[in-house]
Structure formats: C-alpha cells, structure tokens
Amino acid sequence: MKVLGIESSCDECAAAVVEDGKRVLSNVVATQIPFHAVYNGVVPEIASRKHTEWIYGVVKEALDKAGIGPEGVEGVAVTAHPGLLGSLLVGLSFAKAFAWARDLPFIAVNHMLAHLYASRLHVEGPVPPGISAEVEDRGSPPEASYPFLGLLVSGGHSIICRVDDFDDITVLGTTIDDAVGEAFDKVSKYYGFGYPGGAVIDKLAQSGNSGAFRFPMPNLDKGGNRYALSYSGLKTAVINQLEQFRVKGTLTAPNSADGAADIARREGADIAASFQKTAVEILLRSLFRAAEDTGLKTIVAGGGVAANSYLRTRLAEQGELRCIFPPPDLCGDNGAMIAGIGYRYLARGERSPLNVTASARVGGFKRRYP
C-alpha cells in the first residue's frame, strides 16, 4: 500500500510516499529556514503563507520522485497536531481535498508519535532523489521490539516515555519549562551563532572545548521528579551568568597572531561545546534513570535534536543499552514518518472523518509535577 504523507506542523513543507509503512519511495522537504533566519525563530504567519504557496509543488515533486501519479496513491496521511495552527491547517486541508477527490482512505496523525516511528523507515534498491545516502547505506533498520523507551527531543518537546506500541506511549518525564531544542535556539540567538540553533551549535561545538565551562545541572529530585527535565536554569547560566561557570585556566589567551575575531570565535566554540554537553547530559541523566527503573534496555530516539552528534555519540557508548536513531534527514519534520505511521493506522482499518481539524497542542504529552 503506497501512502502519501504530508507534514506542515511548523516551518518545513514536506511530502513523501512510503510503501507498506517502511519503504521510502520519496521524501521531499522544502525548508523555510532562509525566511525565518533573519528573525532567529519561526514567524507563524510567514510559515503558514509559505506552506500555502509551496504545498502543491512539494506534493507533486514527491509523487514524481516516487515514480507514480495521483492514481498510484492508495492512502493519505497528514499531521493534525501538535504544531502551529495556521501551518497545520494548510497541510490538513490539502490532504483532505486530495483524499476526497480520489476517494482514498484518509488518516490524520500525531506527528510526535510519527517521530518515534521514523527509525523503522528504510530504502531498498537505488536511493531515490532527495534521500541521503546514509539511509541507503543503513539498509533495513533494526526493529525495536515493544516495549522500549522513547526519547522525543525537539524545539517544542522533551519527552521520555515508555512505548508499548506505535500509538501507545506512557509519558515518564518531560521538561517543566523549556524544551531542549528551544534552549539551543535561545542560546544561539543570544550569542549570534545563527539559526537554526541546534545545527549551528552542534557544528560550532566540534572545534570547542566542552570543559571550558562547567554549567549547572538542575536539581529536580524532590517531589517525585526523577525523570523530569529543565532547561531554564542552564539557559540563564549560559546567557546571564557565563563567567561564574568558567573553569579556571581555560580562558582563551591571545597571542600576537590572533585577531579579536579569532579570539571571539574560539570563545564562542567553547561556549557552544560546554552548553551542548550539559544540555545533553541533562537528558541522559533522566533517560538512564528511566532505563534503570523500568529495566528496558532499548531506546528509540526521534525529533530534530536526535540528529545531535554529541547525543548520538554518548548513547552509542552505552554498551548495556541498544540505542536506535533515525538517519539525520529523518529526525526533523518530514512526510516519510507521517506516511509510515499513517499506514499502520490505515492497515488496522482506522479512518479519520473529513471534518477532522487541527490542534496546536495534544493531551497526554505532559506530566503534572508537584
């Protein structure tokens, strides 16, 4: 069954065709980064307008790259929540119209659950245009047997959960303030590193000293917050209290060949590396506690921050844990994960009514903390 997946929850206008919930035939993502970079963040009105302008062309390109026409599509899946309401409505409206016009089975899905499904996608045979070679090289991805621990990390979410099926999760811990991706963006914006913050800081950190600053870890052990996460304190430390956490002896020392720009660049790399290390360690502390308490040894990650190289390296070092990641180009928002999880719903006989609407938030993805 070939399913067309459409994703427009934020600033990526994406469409893909996936066969039988696993085989990616095409994956097209039209990024809006250049339009939002000047503001160092997503402007909702600009995002929804660009989706309106691009959605037809992106879907057509996805069908063309899959080698099929509209008549070759056997089902339609689309993101309905969570996300920016205006952006969601563009993709949802297009998907409903496409399904209605061709009398196709239609399903509206939660794109956070789709992020957890992304690691199950793969490409067989020659890699289609628009799909990275890393996906092809991986071949058929390792299957994670249920239950396992899920790590959903993005600009809007930081969630540690128990996953019992593709649509059945129990949230163990979430952030009580900022999401981890949001903290990356805010730190990057403050220091003028660039946008999007996650990718920029990850790259900058490669040349930095992660031990130059010893930023604080939040203390959330009281009140049953064993898996809770928090990033407001780290963000404040990096932005407003930087010198309090500098490790003695790591101050960048100028020499006669150094210019002010070179010194600032090395200093920025040290800040990026130290911040990234602490941000990831905050995640891992709670995640490892969850693994210890539940006895679950498989971890599946998803979301834009799952592409972070330091996070991947640290989890790969955990010999007693099996850690599964999507390839980097399937960590961010994409249509392939929507089509993949959509197939599972459709194969089970589920359908969404054509009067289904979008919602910016979704229940069940937050924990109440004392």
Image (cartoon, helix red, strand yellow):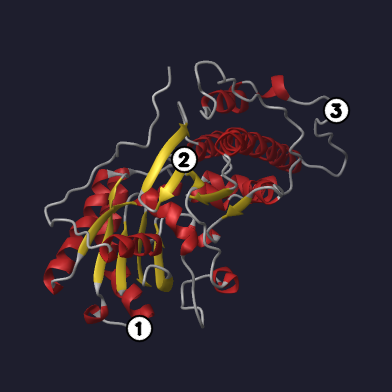
Secondary structure at badge 3 equals: loop
Which quadrant is home to the N terminus? bottom left
Which quadrant is home to the C terminus? top left
Specify few, some or many for label 3: CA neighbours under 10 Å numbering under 14, 14-19, or 20 or more.
few
Please state which amino acid type lies under the numbered disc 1: Gly
Judging by the rendered image, the residue that carries numbered circle 1 is 67
Dot 1 or dot 3, earlier in sequence: 1
Dot 2 or dot 3, earlier in sequence: 2
Res. 33 in view: no
Specify few, some or many for label 2: CA neighbours under 10 Å numbering under 14, 14-19, or 20 or more.
many
Vertical order, 266 against 225 (above or below): below
Front label number (1 vs 2): 2
For residue 204, which numbered disc appears in the image?
none
Total marks placed = 3
Please state which amino acid type lies under the numbered disc 2: Cys
Please state which amino acid type lies under the numbered disc 3: Gly
The answer to which quarter of the image holds residue 359 is top left
Q: Nearer the viewer, residue 145 or 251?
A: 145
Residue appearing at x 47%, y 35% in the figure: 179
Judging by the rendered image, the residue that carries numbered circle 2 is 161
Secondary structure at badge 2 equals: strand
Percent position of residue 101, x then y: 12, 71
Q: Nearer the viewer, residue 50 or 134?
A: 134
Percent position of residue 94, x then y: 20, 62
The answer to which quarter of the image holds residue 29 is bottom left
Vertical order, 50 against 227 (above or below): below
Q: CA distance from mark 2 to mark 3?
A: 40 Å
Secondary structure at badge 1 equals: loop
For residue 249, which numbered disc appears in the image?
3
Left or right of residue 195, residue 364 in this image: left
Percent position of residue 40, x then y: 46, 42
